[in-house]
Image: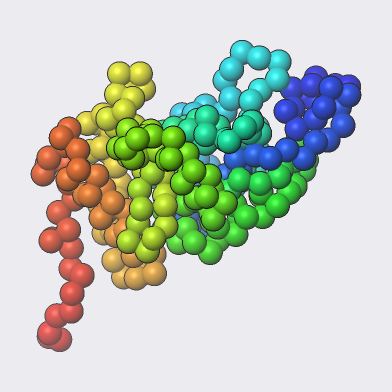
């Protein structure tokens, strides 16, 4: 058995593949193909490549298992604009989901600040992963959730993940006492999604995230709203992010009006022809 097999939590001690119930997250970079096409057309594909490589170098560690162990807790497989994370669970999966929420919050925030907006789906189901294969109904559910429910730059919970999260909330006398209360939000369409701006107040000391990052998030969203004003299907996704950004600022004592986007200055209504 080679070393990579030994380090794979989806193989047994003899190296045979194991299907394991897991927290599975499928992530996609929003608009990646269009970004590449535009970069090629303008002769700037090298610049885009460098930007993506820099973003991954700065952020990938937040979804990698950095435990000093011969057998990591979870695995990450990336292929161009897609990432799959598999985290085998024990018992009721609450610690594993909590780890995933926390790591994905920081990863999504930092990728967004670098200019790469992401969306995804999270599920609980059987999974197998190695260097060449990702297999299992957990992957299918996470992928279908990203494709059919995420829509905007958000990582949403599938039906199976919602069932687990709902069960976990019953462990607490008050929902406000649960860590899920800060990590998850419920959107107006009923979807539960990861509150990725939360690290700006949760991990300020450890990750040096705070006011600088919320302002960086504000600026990148503002630039995308201006860039795609004439492309409504794309623009609406960034408008969703803008509303989420402002909601977050309104619901934390750490930020005020200077940290919010001025959506009143954005022409969203009709005008008379000239």
Extreme residue in the bottom direction = 273
Q: Indicate left or right for 179 with 257 as reference.
A: right
What's the colour scheme? rainbow
Q: Indicate left or right for 150 with 255 as reference.
A: right
The percent coordinates of residue 159 (x first, y second) are 54, 55
Is 137 placed above or below 57 here? below
Residue drawn at point x = 80 percent, y = 30 percent: 11
Q: Indicate left or right for 181 with 23 as reference.
A: left
Residue drawn at point x = 49 percent, y = 61 percent: 149
Residue 113 visible to the viewer? no
| Quarter the C terminus occupies | bottom left
Q: Indicate left or right for 78 with 152 as reference.
A: right
Residue 176 visible to the viewer? yes
Q: Nearer the viewer, residue 227 or 185?
A: 185
Residue drawn at point x = 33 percent, y = 25 percent: 203
Residue drawn at point x = 24 percent, y = 44 percent: 248
Count up the numbered dots: 0
Extreme residue in the front direction = 173
The percent coordinates of residue 230 (x first, y second) are 31, 70
Residue 66: image quadrant is top right
Is 267 placed above or below 57 here? below
């Amino acid at each position: 058995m080679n070393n990579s097999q030994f380090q794979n939590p989806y193989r047994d001690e003899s190296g045979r593949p194991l299907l394991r119930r897991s927290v599975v997250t499928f992530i996609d970079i929003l608009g990646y193909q269009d970004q590449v096409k535009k970069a090629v057309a303008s002769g700037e594909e090298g610049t885009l490549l460098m930007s993506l490589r820099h973003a991954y170098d700065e952020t990938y560690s937040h979804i990698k298992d950095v435990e000093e162990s011969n057998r990591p807790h979870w695995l990450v497989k990336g292929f161009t604009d897609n990432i799959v994370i598999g985290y085998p669970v024990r018992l009721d999966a609450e610690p594993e989901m909590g780890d995933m929420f926390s790591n994905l919050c920081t990863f999504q925030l930092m990728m967004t600040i670098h200019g790469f907006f992401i969306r995804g789906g999270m599920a609980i189901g059987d999974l197998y992963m190695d260097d060449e294969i990702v297999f299992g109904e957990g992957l299918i559910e996470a992928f279908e959730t990203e494709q059919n429910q995420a829509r905007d730059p958000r990582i949403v919970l599938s039906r199976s993940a919602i069932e687990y999260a709902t069960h976990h909330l019953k462990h607490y006398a008050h929902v406000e006492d649960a860590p899920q209360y800060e990590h998850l939000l419920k959107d107006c369409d009923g979807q539960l999604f990861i509150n990725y701006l939360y690290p700006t107040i949760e991990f300020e000391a450890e990750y040096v995230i705070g006011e600088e990052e919320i302002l960086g998030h504000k600026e990148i969203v503002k630039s995308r709203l201006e860039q795609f004003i004439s492309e409504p299907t794309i623009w609406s996704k960034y408008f969703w992010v803008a509303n989420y950004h402002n909601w977050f600022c309104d619901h934390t004592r750490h930020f005020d009006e200077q940290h919010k986007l001025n959506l009143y200055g954005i022409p969203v209504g009709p005008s008379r022809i000239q």
